[in-house]
Amino acid sequence: MLSLRAPPRTLSASPWRRRGRLDGFAAPRCVSAAPPATTLETATARSAGVSFPILVNGCTGKMGVSVAEAATSRGLHLVPVSFSSRENLDKTIQVGDTDVEIYGPSAREDVLSSVIDEYPDVVVVDYTAPDSVNSNAELYCKLGVPFVMGTTGGDQQLLYKSVQDSENYALISPQMGKQVVAFLAAMETIAEQFPGAFSGYRLEVLESHQAGKLDTSGTAKAVIACFEKLGAVFDMERQMVKIRDPEQQLYMVGVPEEHIEGHAFHLYHLTSPDDSVSFEFQHNVCGRSIYAEGSVDAAVFLYKKVQSMDPKRIYNMIDVLQEGDMR
Ligand SMILES: NC(=O)C1=CN([C@@H]2O[C@H](COP(=O)(O)OP(=O)(O)OC[C@H]3O[C@@H](n4cnc5c(N)ncnc54)[C@H](OP(=O)(O)O)[C@@H]3O)[C@@H](O)[C@H]2O)C=CC1
Ligand SMILES: O=C(O)C1=N[C@H](C(=O)O)C[C@H](O)C1
């Protein structure tokens, strides 16, 4: 177990350690996960003309249940079905007034087909696990059901290929939080307009998430891709600092104790070749409400695209933001 006095080796040469208690990595003041009632009312009113069935896959998990709750709060019809990687779970999850029945892998194709028969305009939102991204996407594409892929990891190239080949509708994004999506959009714009502007700069990246997170942050990977276009050099395997130890998160990163089990802190530090210039960017999120609300925005956006038979078919959250469809 690592302590403040003995920082992890991976952090030993980093700017975060030089600052002692990572004091620049301060947590936001996180109060409540629930948005104020007035915001919900506004959102419900805004999506009043749009109501459709939504199936959230991964309701045994934390994001799945948060999205299901946000969807019902926004007046969408939650399909009372979700899937698990476990067979014969014989479990229901209560979300508001809905009892969501959980099915195992062997039943998922038949059950999803029946759902599509009953709710032909259903949209699926997927928050499962990195190792199910591709097989789940294959199934949604095979059955022609539009889906929002919030789950990170898997083979992203294959994911896009499955959607392209099937001509299905999908929205894929490792990041659903509006303000972080805006930051990512800004990074993509800078990278496109000024490629090589940070040539030779050293990049250091730290990401801290709850211990149960299986993969490296998909958001960090997307931001790093932009820094690479800007000319910074980064070796994902060797240089990425992933913090999953609650003690380090509490004492070194500064995550509030109540958010140790649900946070996403990211820090990117750039240093010029002669050490005379440095840049630092951070986005620190406590809880999951911004992703849950963004996921519902994504489902509403995708539903509208399907209804209007939009030819683009594959979208990301920057598309949603650009069309002014994020609350
Ligand atoms: N895009 C974004 O903005 C965000 C993305 N994420 C991503 O969402 C994913 C889930 O995160 P989180 O909810 O915190 O993780 P959890 O571990 O809490 O939940 C994931 C759930 O997926 C279930 N699961 C695993 N395999 C399958 C499968 N094949 N079919 C159906 N369900 C399955 C597991 O349940 P069981 O054991 O019953 O199978 C588990 O409960 C991660 O990839 C994370 O990175 C998270 C936050 C924001
Ligand atoms: O697993 C999480 O929690 C999160 N995953 C996403 C990612 O991998 O980028 C988004 C956010 O960091 C929360």
Image (cartoon, rainbow, N blue to C red):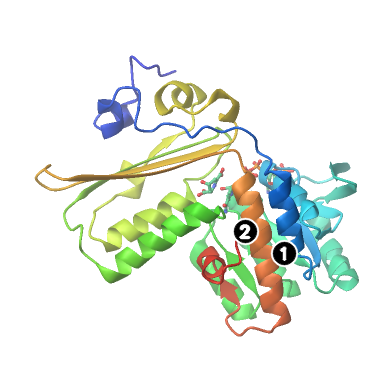
Give the left or right position of residue 125, taking residue 247 as reference. right
What residue do we see at 69% from left, 43% from top?
Answer: 36
Q: Quadrant of the C terminus?
A: bottom right
Residue of label 1: 46
Q: Quadrant of the N terminus?
A: top left
| Residue type, label 1 | Arg
| Residue type, label 2 | Arg
* Label 2 vs 1, first from the N-terminus: 1
Label 2 – label 1 distance at C-alpha: 9 Å
* Spot occupied by residue 242 in the image (x, y as percentages of width and height): 42, 37
Residue of label 2: 327
Residue 84 can be seen, yes or no: no
Give the class, few, some or many, for how many residues have Cα within 10 Å of label 1's Cα (few <14, many ≥20).
few
Given the current orientation, which residue lies at the most extreme top position?
5
Give the left or right position of residue 19, taking residue 291 as reference. left
Given the current orientation, which residue lies at the most extreme front position?
38
* Spot occupied by residue 5 in the image (x, y as percentages of width and height): 33, 14
Give the class, few, some or many, for how many residues have Cα within 10 Å of label 2's Cα (few <14, many ≥20).
some
